[in-house]
Image (spheres, grey):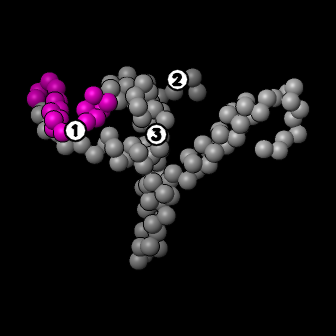
């Protein structure tokens, strides 16, 4: 790595871990919508459909980012990319039982992320609906 900083200003380890790796992480986040959420699929027959598909994909990315930021804290998916969230904990098979007072989920015994899903759901329910500071 080439830098204009002197060894006294920053050690090689710190530069690599804090700057270089962070840059790679940002690049991976930029690549997420086209690769993981199919934002590059704009092959519809009408001109109106392509921007609509891009809007849906962008909205899906915002939801997935919010889910990762708010819901996965304290789980194995706290730093997961959109594709990992989409492919691992989200595809569930559960029986939904609706009563007058609550909604119950019964997971399949084969679903290995049931505890993680319950934790994510609790985290999302505990998160504030909006940022009150801004």
Residue 72: x percent and y percent? 41, 31
| Range covered by the magenta-colored residues | 99-118
Mark nearer the viewer, 3 or 2: 3
Q: Does the stretch in magenta take in 58?
A: no
The crowding category of the residue bearing disc 2, from other C-alpha atoms within 10 Å (few below 14, some 14 to 19, many at least 20), is: few
Marks 3 and 2 close (CB-CB < 8 Å): no
Residue 21: x percent and y percent? 65, 40
Identify the residue at horizontal 46%, vertical 69% (top origin).
42
Read off the residue under disc 3: 80
Give how far apart the Cα atoms at labels 3 and 1 are. 19 Å
Marks 3 and 1 close (CB-CB < 8 Å): no
Give how far apart the Cα atoms at labels 2 and 1 are. 37 Å
On residue 132, the disc is: 2
Identify the residue at horizontal 45%, vertical 32% (top origin).
78
Q: Compare marks 2 and 1 and give the one earlier in the sequence.
A: 1
Residue 92: x percent and y percent? 24, 43
Give how far apart the Cα atoms at labels 3 and 2 are. 27 Å
Mark nearer the viewer, 2 or 1: 1
Screen quadrant of the N terminus:
top right
Determine whether the residue tagged by mark 2 lies in a helix, strand or loop.
loop
């Amino acid at each position: 790595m080439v830098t204009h900083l002197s060894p006294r200003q920053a050690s090689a380890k710190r530069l690599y871990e804090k700057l270089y790796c962070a840059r790679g992480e940002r690049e991976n986040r930029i690549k997420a919508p086209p690769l993981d959420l199919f934002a590059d699929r704009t092959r519809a027959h009408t001109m109106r459909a392509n921007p609509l598909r891009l809007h849906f994909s962008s909205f899906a990315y915002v939801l997935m980012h919010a889910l990762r930021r708010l819901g996965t804290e304290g789980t194995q998916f706290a730093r997961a990319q959109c594709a990992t969230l989409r492919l691992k904990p989200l595809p569930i098979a559960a029986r939904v039982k609706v009563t007058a007072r609550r909604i119950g989920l019964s997971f399949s015994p084969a679903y290995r992320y049931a505890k993680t899903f319950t934790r994510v759901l609790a985290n999302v329910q505990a998160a504030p609906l909006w940022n009150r500071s801004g």
